[in-house]
Amino acid sequence: MARLKKIGIIAVVILSILWIGKVALLDRSPVPEKSDFSLNLKTIRALAHESKGPLPESLHALVIGEGAFPASAVVAGEGLTRKISMVFASFQIVYPGNKTIIIDSAMGQKEHKAMAPDAPYYPERFDAMQDAMLKASQILLTHEHPDHIGGIAISPNVQNLKDKLVLTKEQINDPFRQPEQFTPEALRVIQSLKPLEFEHFISPAPGIVLIKTPSHSPGTQFIYVTLKNGTEFLLVGDIVWSMENIRKLKGKAYLLNLMFLQENRALVASQIRMLSNVLNDPENKIQIVPAHDAERLKELFESKSIVEGFL
């Protein structure tokens, strides 16, 4: 009897440790009641109209790869059985006369298959994105992780992209980048760039404002876009992977941070609260666009807010 009692106590201790571990690693990702991060929309909107030239006419998106993660990985505490659909996309801002700016470059097929081996990938779209980068006047990044800079990292025409790449010092130097995922030529080109330097906000072109938000990575930035018709977008990169993060006020699972993300979780949480404030403010009509949210992108395609496919 004593032995059974001892075994029972050990079992309870083990189960308690497992439960605490689950709560800490998968279920909790708290967001503060108030955000320390100010978006300062008045300043951003003024900056977007300061640059000379017409505002962009449309925002396009090209889905280059797909995937799905367990819900709890994307939104802490949401369970492991449900999957949340993800996309790996590139965005194209189109001006009058078909002048374009590209945001993010997804990644190559080899890198995609390493991350999501059984998920769809569209090499013809990757090629179309490469052509679009060659024709673009600028190429911007929401941040420097491989699934956003990857199309540049292995571009066969990277030397011809050099004068188009508008990257910050953090995006050029972030040690999270994996040199083995870059061609030697791409590394040379990126490391030779003169970095874009600014304090909080800068407008690189009419209708576009870059907003420093280091948290998910050192070089993370929101990209605000306003169109000629008044539609406003906030491309938030990977601050959140899903609109569920914003609606439910939950970040990603802490386990992912321990494994590979290396986020500044306090800053991410504060930015999630700020995005919730924007989303729930009836006076703001800004369309929030997480980089990987398949359902959100589908909604924006269906509402014609974002055009599916590149020029």
Image: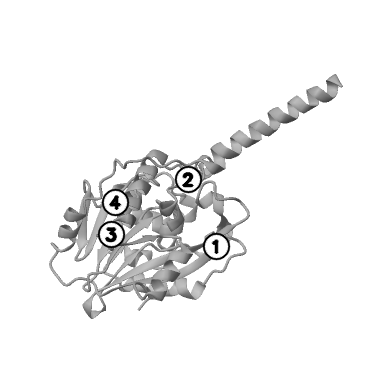
Q: Are the two marked residues, 4 and 2, in contact with CB atoms closer than 8 angstroms?
A: no
Residue 286 in percent (x, y) is at 29, 62
Q: Residue at x 24, y 60 (%)?
A: 283
| Residue type for callout 2 | Leu
Quarter of the image for residue 59 reads: bottom left
Question: Image height check: is 71 above or below 95?
Answer: above
Q: Residue at x 45, y 42 (%)?
A: 262
Q: Nearer the viewer, mark 1 or mark 4?
A: 1
Q: Earlier in the sequence, mark 3 or mark 1?
A: 1
* Numbered label attached to residue 67: 1
| Residue type for callout 1 | Gly
In the foreground, 97 or 150: 97
Residues at marks 1 and 4, CA–CA distance in whole angstroms: 29 Å
Q: Residue furthest front?
A: 282
Q: Earlier in the sequence, mark 4 or mark 2?
A: 4
Residue 171 in percent (x, y) is at 34, 50
Secondary structure at numbered mark 2: helix
Q: Which residue is mark 4?
A: 168
Q: Earlier in the sequence, mark 1 or mark 4?
A: 1
Q: Is residue 77 shown left or right of residue 274? A: right
Figure label count? 4
Residues at marks 4 and 3, CA–CA distance in whole angstroms: 33 Å
Q: Nearer the viewer, mark 4 or mark 2?
A: 2
Q: Are the two marked residues, 4 and 3, in contact with CB atoms closer than 8 angstroms?
A: no
Q: Which residue is mark 3?
A: 282
Mark 2: few, some, or many residues within 10 Å (few <14, many ≥20)?
some
| Residue type for callout 3 | Pro
Residues at marks 2 and 1, CA–CA distance in whole angstroms: 18 Å
